Image: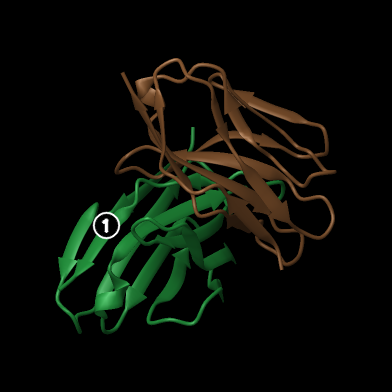
Chain colours: A green, B brown
Amino acid sequence: SQTIHQWPATLVQPVGSPLSLECTVEGTSNPNLYWYRQAAGRGLQLLFYSVGIGQISSEVPQNLSASRPQDRQFILSSKKLLLSDSSFYLCAWSYAASGETQYFGPGTRLLVL
Amino acid sequence: GDSVTQMEGPVTLSEEAFLTINCTYTATGYPSLFWYVQYPGEGLQLLLKATKADDKGSNKGFEATYRKETTSFHLEKGSVQVSDSAVYFCALKRLTGGGNKLTFGTGTQLKVEL
């Protein structure tokens, strides 16, 4: 069966520090991968998606970047965090060919102080 | 562009009450429609989906019917339980662009009390 992991579960970082959040998927090959942000009391905002290794599409301009160094690994990064980056970050995957359904990880809560 | 509109919450119900959470959408063509549920502190889980007009998705006592004429996909449950307390998201799959991207509504929080 397929599983998706995210870590860390919770992170507190100072303003201006770098960020690296990791997401890995097991049990499937060549998945589509997604990074979402969910601010408190608000809906989900798609940040990035990837249809293959090294292929990243950005949905909104921001202080973050994403990379996909391996087939089932998706990383969300920042060189310098802003207070406004505090949020709940969710990774998801779907089958590439017929993948309408997305499967979400447990999320990472990031607090920037 | 595509969009999803959900009723604002929180919705507070007593156990065994009837639930309706409204969802309407704007999209070109006939998108697939989804309901996801998010329990406190967790990621989202797919609750149900419908891929064409008049389809009914159902799971765990929840139902939603794809209504093309009213562009709606309202979520219903006949008798809610305390364990149904969560945030519910309506979503559609975009028909344009690649990557099977979803457009989500803002979510509706449901609180069920004894």
Residue highlighted by disc 1: A109
Can residue A44 be seen? yes
Task: Indicate the quadrant where residue B28 lies.
Answer: bottom right
Does A113 sit left or right of B97 as displayed? left
As displayed, is residue A102 above or below residue A44?
A: above
Which quarter shows the C terminus of chain B? top left
Residue at coordinates 21% horizontally, 65% vertically from top-left? A111
Residue A86 position within the rendered picture, expressed as x and y whole percent measured from the top left: 27, 68
In the rendered image, the vertical position of residue B58 relative to residue A80, given as above or below: above
Q: Position of residue B51 (x, y in %)?
A: 76, 39
- Chain letter for mark 1: A
Seen from the viewer's position, the closer of residues B22 and B56 is B22
Q: Secondary structure at mark 1?
A: strand
The amino acid marked with disc number 1 is Arg
- Residue at the spot x=76%, y=58% of the render? B27
Crowding at mark 1 (Cα within 10 Å: few <14, some 14-19, many 20+) = many
Tell me which residue sits at (82%, 50%) in the image.
B30
Is residue A100 in view from this perspective? Answer: no
Q: Quadrant of the N terminus of chain B?
A: bottom right
Give the residue drawn at x 25%, y 63%: A110
> Residue B82: x percent and y percent?
35, 22
Residue B96 rendering spot, x and y as whole percentages: 76, 65
B40 lies left or right of A38? left
Q: Nearer the viewer, residue A95 or A104?
A: A104
